[in-house]
Image (spheres, rainbow, N blue to C red):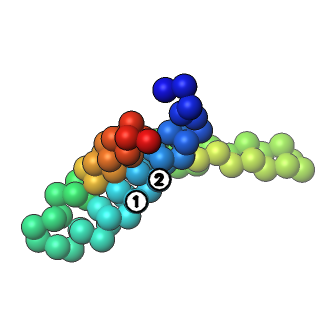
Amino acid sequence: MKGKNSWVLLLMLLSGIVLGGFIGNLADGIVGLSWLNFGQSFGLNDPLVLNFGILVITFGLSIRITMASIIGVIIAILTYRML
């Protein structure tokens, strides 16, 4: 663990989430693989808007966790441990 960088782990985890979500969306139309897109969304449904007259700031965050993104995270962690 001495030579491993935590930024590499973070980058690999984010890559696993993004690629897993992408694969889950692609597998949505396929009958045998549609379970990969099963998941839950959480976050702000309507964005929070702060209006200061001159400046308007909008905050919003929505996260969707799918089975494919969980598998992507597991693969990213296993890959990181093999490095």
User: Which of 4/75 is in front?
Assistant: 4
Extreme residue toward the bottom, this view: 29
Which residue occupies 32% across, 47% down? 75
| As drawn, 75 above or below 6 | below
Residue 15 visible in image: yes
User: Which of 78/18 is in front?
Assistant: 78
| As drawn, 26 above or below 67 | below
Label 1 crowd (10 A; few <14 / some 14-19 / many >=20)? some
Which residue occupies 23% across, 54% down? 38
Q: Which mark is residue 15?
A: 2
Which residue occupies 68% across, 49% down? 58
**CB atoms of marks 1 and 2 within 8 Å:** yes
Name the spot of residue 45 as percent of width and height, x first. 47, 48
Quarter of the view holding residue 70: top left
For the residues marked 1 and 2, what is the alpha-carbon distance in whole angstroms? 6 Å
Q: Quadrant of the C terminus?
A: top left
Name the spot of residue 44 as percent of width and height, x first. 50, 43
Side (left or right) of 53 relative to 1:
right
User: Which of 59/4 is in front?
Assistant: 4
Q: Which mark is residue 19?
A: 1
Give the structural element (helix, strand or loop) at label 1: helix
Name the spot of residue 68 as percent of width and height, x first. 28, 54
Label 2 crowd (10 A; few <14 / some 14-19 / many >=20)? some
Extreme residue toward the right, this view: 54
Looking at the rendered structure, the number of numbered marks drawn on it comes to 2
Which residue occupies 79% across, 50% down? 56
Q: What type is the residue that disc 2 sits on?
A: Ser
